[in-house]
Image (cartoon, rainbow, N blue to C red):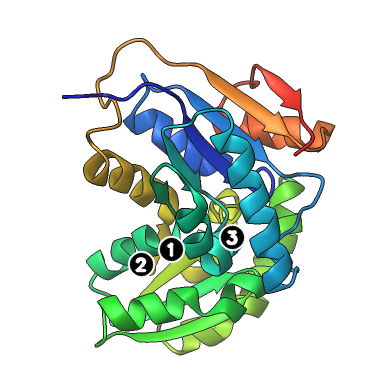
């Protein structure tokens, strides 16, 4: 196995992409990672397509200046609006979250798949189009859930208010008898406990984070180290630091992150 030197770069609009970082580390613990959270300009999900593209290209260029060997666009909105542009401008391979999530949903064999995400992700129709291409026999409905991100960032993943909001958003999909729900935002896995209560045990909740890790390990095997030896370093960069980021990051990663740096990109 030939492994290329340099870290794996990951960027997100904020803290949610740490769910992707966690999945990558579990699959490839020996790798070095650099994570960029564009916390000064979040959320991306309410921004225009042109703005998201500009932010995404800016973030990718910053990470490429750190000689990353692979770039993961962990933000669903950025993956939906800007993945092709980021890939065209990047000197290294780029992996988004949309297609891995779609493939993971299709493996469930659900005939009706719901997609829940930010307003921007749903408006882009990236998941709907990918599902139509890869699973043309599957029925798809997509619902924006804009209140889920602030609930996740409050740490209310197991809270009656989150249950109530989830019922409001998800009841139409449940009445439609969706067999799987794609969590098309990296924040949404933080709400899994409440979401599971609302949807019940029979609906598949599809989180693209593990699917992204599988895609990196399988499709870019020549670049990455999948052995389970000594853990590599993780360096976190933010465009704005806050106590909230540190609190949520600690909850996601299971420990207080080291090497946090505030950067101007």
Which numbered circle lies on residue 78?
Answer: 3
Q: Quadrant of residue 129?
A: bottom left
Callouts 3 and 1 close, C-beta under 8 Å: no
Crowdedness of circle 2 by 10 Å Cα count: few (<14), some, many (20+)? many
Residue projecting furthest to the left: 1
| Helix, strand or loop status at disc 1 | helix
| Helix, strand or loop status at disc 3 | helix
Residue 258 visible, this angle: yes
Nearest to viewer (mark 3 / mark 2): 3
Crowdedness of circle 1 by 10 Å Cα count: few (<14), some, many (20+)? many
Q: Say which quadrant the N terminus sits in.
A: top left
Residue projecting furthest to the top: 230
Q: CA distance from mark 3 to mark 1?
A: 10 Å
Q: CA distance from mark 1 to mark 2?
A: 6 Å
Crowdedness of circle 3 by 10 Å Cα count: few (<14), some, many (20+)? many
Callouts 3 and 2 close, C-beta under 8 Å: no
Callouts 1 and 2 close, C-beta under 8 Å: yes
Nearer the observer, 164 or 79 = 79
- Residue 190 place in picture, x, y as percent: 59, 49
Residue 170 lies, with reference to residue 85, above or below; the image says: below
Q: Say which quadrant the C terminus sits in.
A: top right
Q: Residue at x 37, y 21 (%)?
A: 5
Mark 1 = which residue?
98
Residue 249 lies, with reference to residue 91, above or below; the image says: above
| Helix, strand or loop status at disc 2 | helix
Q: Is residue 219 left or right of residue 91?
A: left
Q: Residue at x 37, y 75 (%)?
A: 130
Nearest to viewer (mark 3 / mark 1): 3
- Residue 173 place in picture, x, y as percent: 50, 83
Which numbered circle lies on residue 102?
Answer: 2
Give the tally of numbered discs.
3
Q: Residue at x 64, y 22 (%)?
A: 257
């Amino acid at each position: 196995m030939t492994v290329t030197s340099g870290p794996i770069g990951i960027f997100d609009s904020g803290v949610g992409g740490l769910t992707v970082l966690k999945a990558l580390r579990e699959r490839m613990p020996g790798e070095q990672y650099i994570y960029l959270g564009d916390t000064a300009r979040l959320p991306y999900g309410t921004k225009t397509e042109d703005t998201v593209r500009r932010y995404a290209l800016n973030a990718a260029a910053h990470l490429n200046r750190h000689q990353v060997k692979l770039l993961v666009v962990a933000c669903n909105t950025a993956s939906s609006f800007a993945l092709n542009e980021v890939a065209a401008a990047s000197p290294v391979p780029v992996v988004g979250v949309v297609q891995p999530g779609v493939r993971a949903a299709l493996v469930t064999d659900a005939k009706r798949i719901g997609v829940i995400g930010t307003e921007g992700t749903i408006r882009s129709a990236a998941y709907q189009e990918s599902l139509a291409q890869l699973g043309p026999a599957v029925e798809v409905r997509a619902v924006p859930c804009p209140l889920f991100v602030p609930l996740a960032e409050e740490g209310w993943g197991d809270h009656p208010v989150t249950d109530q909001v989830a019922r409001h958003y998800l009841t139409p999909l449940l009445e439609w008898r969706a067999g799987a729900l794609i969590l098309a935002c990296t924040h949404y896995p933080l709400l899994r406990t409440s979401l599971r209560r609302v949807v019940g045990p029979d609906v598949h909740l599809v989180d693209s984070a593990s699917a992204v890790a599988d895609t990196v390990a399988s499709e870019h095997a020549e670049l990455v180290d999948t052995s389970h030896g000594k853990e590599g370093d993780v360096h976190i960069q933010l465009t704005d630091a806050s106590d909230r980021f540190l609190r949520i990051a600690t909850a996601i990663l299971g420990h207080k992150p080291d090497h946090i740096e505030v950067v101007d990109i």
